[in-house]
Amino acid sequence: ASASASASASAGESSPTSQGSQEGSDFIQFSSVTGNHNVNRSLWVPALYDAARAIDLMNDIHTSRNNTNVSVSGGGSSGSGGGLDRHGRNAILHTLAKLCILMANQKSYGKLIADNSVNIGWKAGIDDNSSLPTTCEMKSIDEVLSKMEELLQEMECESDPSFQPDIISYNHVIGTLARTNTGKGTEKSAGNRSCMEACDRAEWYLRRMELSEDLTDGTGDGGDDEDLLPTTAFADTTTYNLVLHTFSNMSKEQGNRHHVSRSNMRQSLEAAQRANDILERMEQRYLRSKREDVRPLTITYSTVLNAWANVGRAENAERLLKRFIALAEDAGSETDYVKPNLICFNSVISAWANKGGKESAENAMKIFQSMEELAVSDKENFKDIYPDTITYSSVISAFARSGRDDAGDRAMELLEQSIRLSNEEGMKELQPDSMTFNTVLDALSKQGQLEYSKSKGQMTERAIQSIQTKAENVFNLMKDMHQEGNKSVRPCTISYNILIDMYAKMSAPDKIEATLKEMDESYQAGNRVVRPCTITYNSLLYALANSNDKSGITKAMNLLKEMEGRGGKRRLPDDVRVDLYSIINVINALAKKAMFDKTAPKMIESVLSSMEQRYLDGETDLKPNAMCYNCCIDAWSKSGVDDAEENARRMLDRMSTMSEKLSAPELKPDTISYTSIITAISRRKHSDGPARAEAVFATMMEAGVKPNIYTYNNIINCWASSGRKDAAVNAEKILMQMQEESDKGNTEITPNAITFSTTISCWARQGDKGSGEGAERILDMIESINARGDTSIKSNQYTYGAVINAWSKSYGHSDTVMRAIGILDRMEEKYVNGNIHLRPNGPCYNAVINAIAKSSSKDKAFLAKSMLDRMKKSHENGNEDAKPDMRTYSTILNACAFTFIEDQAEKEEVLQIARQALKEILNGSDAPAFVFASFLLACSRLMGAGTKRDGVAQVLFNECRRRGVVDVKVILNLRKMASPECLRQILKGSRVPVGNIVLDDIPQEWRSNVKSRTPRFRR
């Protein structure tokens, strides 16, 4: 067994130096706590094979001498003295512990046989034809651990103290638990205990030893747990460190997994907290007992710091580090083994990096700076904590995960600083390695992706080239440094994949193809650290599928077939194959295109069908998940085809069928599935939509699926788009029900801004006497919620605009105009008082002007002009959103055209308002036909008949004809304005009929810029 320790030393591990059974204990302590398992199989296998033979020989000797059956567990008759003594049994425990390390090493390389046991391959390279020793017949880590615990229990049952277990015995078992708990959360991995089982068992041994000491010194009463039996040894520092390492392993296994489940994340957080609690118990025990062999060491604190770092609980990690620093400062130069070392500081920085976020990057930087300051200012206590390569890499990682706009630039600054200090000041420990470079590349990639995302794909070519060039420069620097002889820096598959992922997210498929070609050529030339893999091709798949190029999705589908091994021009490496992410990339991209590409839903179904079949054929990693089906249902719901709802329902049924067929409850239709069906119904805008949506809702509730805010919002939208007279009343009823449930504690359906705005819009679409009052009632409800201190929902300019719009459509209400103006007054007052979200915008003013124009007031033209002046003043005072536009002036024209007054002087004033409005339109942009039609109508009603009016008609029509905006309404209103003689002169030679007219009756050159909904042909 000790030979395997020497083998570790030759592979880079420290070898123990003490003698006897303590030798094994020292090595266990070192390898378990550090996790340094550099197993050299060519030495370990024969060494452990010989140790196993020695165990069998010991058993044979003791059996023949004492006629007792001593198995691999070493047990003899209790108290007989005929079995192996403590040293012999500890030697067996030592051997079994090493066997577990070997098995864990084999498992990490996936060398498992059919029954999920570990295939060591004992006979390979061993010139021995005898049968396997008993120990070598064990097939799983759990089996070995069970044997170790069985042996320990037999030792505990011995009456002779020389046969009873000592602290070395317990530490062997706890150390093995610490090194081999590689299961997932509460799930067992192949032939292995789960992480939590190992943690619980390790702490169980610790608590028993703590209880024994408490009973011995009179500080304990035995406790209430009957399962905690006293032990024959007290816990020492090694024991605590091993148990802490078990929990640290648990947090690492779960905290760093991608897409970790909530339950497993809870397990990880629990593991970190329990490690912290054990540390506090250890500190208290040391202070109480004054036993130096139970004193917390630097490695003790660093293990707990690492546990907090693994789960991203940076605040807890930093709090513990500060406490540790204070302890070190209090101790002064008394001792070196209770002072924070470089690993401790790096763990805290890693914790901030794992947490992510903008503040985390700054906090990591503060720790980094404090390390430099402490190393200079307090050399006595902190001489060895100057930042190293790992420190730099961790801080760079914190920036990479921060989501900051300058993450990549800050990462580059740190990289340049480490290179400068390494080259110019001889600080070789700061020489960046491949991991450092890859992290910088990742930071630059994410910075570029963030900028591209914020621009909504409209980032300038120059900006795209700038960020890509930065990343490419870093990549090329890696190449140059490697060519200059730096063996620790070399572009690898990860480096290329980061670049390719950046190109993919920034829509640059051509650059991906070029980079792929370079990777392949490098690999073919013998560079074995660079080879395109599934992740590489998944990035290309993403880029092609999300490309704006129409051929992009076709290329993506072809690449997917090639990755599936179904032909194609491209020759892919043998280990490149479709995985779940490949399929999700394509399905997600197709779902996004469904509104514009009607074939997208069918293509998703095709991909899903292939996925289902491959899973049924045995490819278990391609098991369809709910998201895949939901994307397909959503694609149908957004497609806008006539049978969208029917197809969405069909996919819902297929989802249920596959759930039953695969015995997979996670595939049952969920909230998203049912909500997507309701979305499909709302998009049809049928009068029976609400009833159909309510039926889906009822089915959903019967299935035990809880609706969320999106479900209710879509039902309200079904009412809003139904065109029914009772739509607004029912929409408001649903809103009130949601609010009531929310007040009772169901926050999943708390109405949000969309809920309120959709209900207000529903009232606006109602277009009847109660529209304005209904919309204003909802607005009052929002502000009442805000008054209670709940600011999760705030009214904004769009909310107020919708209420004003509702008042503008409250036909039949006697006070429409004043109520609309009142809402605008209320809005302006709140904006002046500091509510920037209520800055009145153009649509708000336009809605008031529209309410005025549609009113029966004789002064509507003057009121509309007054509101226009108010709008202009707001714009002049700095409100950029209040600039009058085409709609503003055209509504003013409409108000003038429908102002019915008798006084000629007032008519002239109204006409002047109309002239000014037309002038503003003609100065600002191209005027559409309806502007001229409105002005012609205004002139026909406000100007007296005669030569002057005919002259204006002639000028106006010529301008319309020049602009190519003569439509049917222009002709009809021209007939009202011009005298018969003038009309004949204007239309002379045009063949425009005197009676009924359609668009095609008008010469093409006159209507070349007309966008009209008027019938083009006679029926």
Image (cartoon, rainbow, N blue to C red):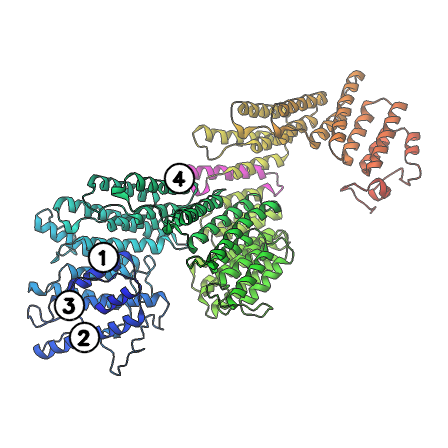
Snapshot quadrant of residue 435: bottom left
Looking at the image, is mark 4 or mark 1 earlier in the sequence? 1
Residue 336 percent coordinates (x, y): 22, 47
Snapshot quadrant of residue 939: top right
Looking at the image, is mark 2 or mark 4 earlier in the sequence? 2
Residue type, numbered disc 2? Ala
Q: Nearer the viewer, mark 1 or mark 3?
A: 3
User: What whole-number distance in Å separates the C-alpha atoms at marks 4 and 1?
Assistant: 41 Å
The image's mark for residue 54 is 2
SS under mark 1 = helix
Residue type, numbered disc 1? Ala
Residue type, numbered disc 3? Arg
**Is the residue marked by circle 1 packed among few (<14), some (14-19), or many (20+) residues within 10 Å?**
many
Looking at the image, is mark 3 or mark 4 earlier in the sequence? 3
Q: What residue do we see at 53% from left, 36% from top? A: 756
Residue 946 in view (yes/no): no
Instruction: Give the residue pinned by disc 4.
Output: 745
- Residue occupying the far bottom of the picture: 129
Residue 700 percent coordinates (x, y): 48, 51
Left or right of 359? Residue 501 is right
Q: What residue do we see at 47% from left, 29% from top? A: 784
Contact check, label 4 and label 1, Cβ < 8 Å? no
Q: Nearer the viewer, mark 4 or mark 1?
A: 1
Instruction: Give the residue pinned by disc 3.
Output: 89
Q: Reply above or below: 415 against 43.
A: above
Looking at the image, is mark 1 or mark 3 earlier in the sequence? 3
Q: Which residues are magenta?
A: 720-749
Residue type, numbered disc 4? Gly
Tell me, yes or no, whether the highlighted magenta stretch contains residue 726: yes
Instruction: Give the residue pinned by disc 1.
Output: 202
Q: Reply above or below: 285 against 153.
A: above
